[in-house]
Amino acid sequence: MARTQTNGSAEKNAEKAYADLEMQIATLKSDVAQLTSTLGDFAQAQKEQLGVAASDSIDAAKKLGIAKAEAAQAQARDAVAGAERAVRANPMASVGFAAGAGFLAGLLATRR
């Protein structure tokens, strides 16, 4: 009879251990689900933050590009205006310079 009591208490201990294990597994599943949710929220926040930073960088680059293009246009206009003033001030020298440049370009083109 002692054996049946030992087996009975062993079964109760096994059932209790099984129930404890099931509870721990359920807790672990809950913790993993919560961790997954937290990581998802963190990834979404990072994505939004990177999107804002990228947008700001693009806007800054666009503004800088526009400013550089406007500066280049102004410099080109100034160069054209300076050349025009030089031609108007010295028309004969300008014609001679243009003729000489054309002659050199012709020589270089025919030497191939």
Image (spheres, rainbow, N blue to C red):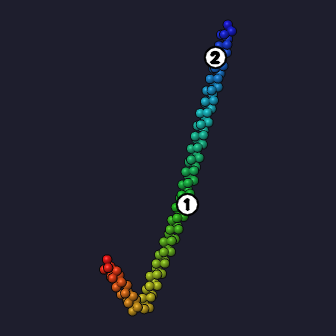
Residue holding disc 1: 56
* Residue under the point 55% across and 60% down: 56
On the rendered image, what quadrant is the N terminus found in? top right
As helix, strand or loop, the secondary structure at mark 1 comes to helix
As helix, strand or loop, the secondary structure at mark 2 comes to helix
- Give the total of numbered labels: 2
Q: Which residue type does callout 1 highlight?
A: Asp
Q: Which residue type does callout 2 highlight?
A: Glu
How many neighbours does mark 1 have within 10 angstroms: few (below 14), some (14-19), or many (20 or more)?
few
Q: Label 2 vs label 1: CA separation?
A: 67 Å
Q: Residue 101 at x, y = what percent?
A: 37, 84
In this picture, residue 1 sits left or right of residue 85: right
Q: Is residue 93 visible?
A: yes
The residue nearer to you, when weighing 109 against 68, is 109
Q: Residue 36 at x, y = what percent?
A: 58, 40
Q: Which residue is the extreme one toward the right?
A: 2
Residue holding disc 2: 11
Closer to viewer: mark 2 or mark 1: 2
Q: Which residue is the extreme one toward the front?
A: 111
Quarter of the image for residue 53 reads: bottom right
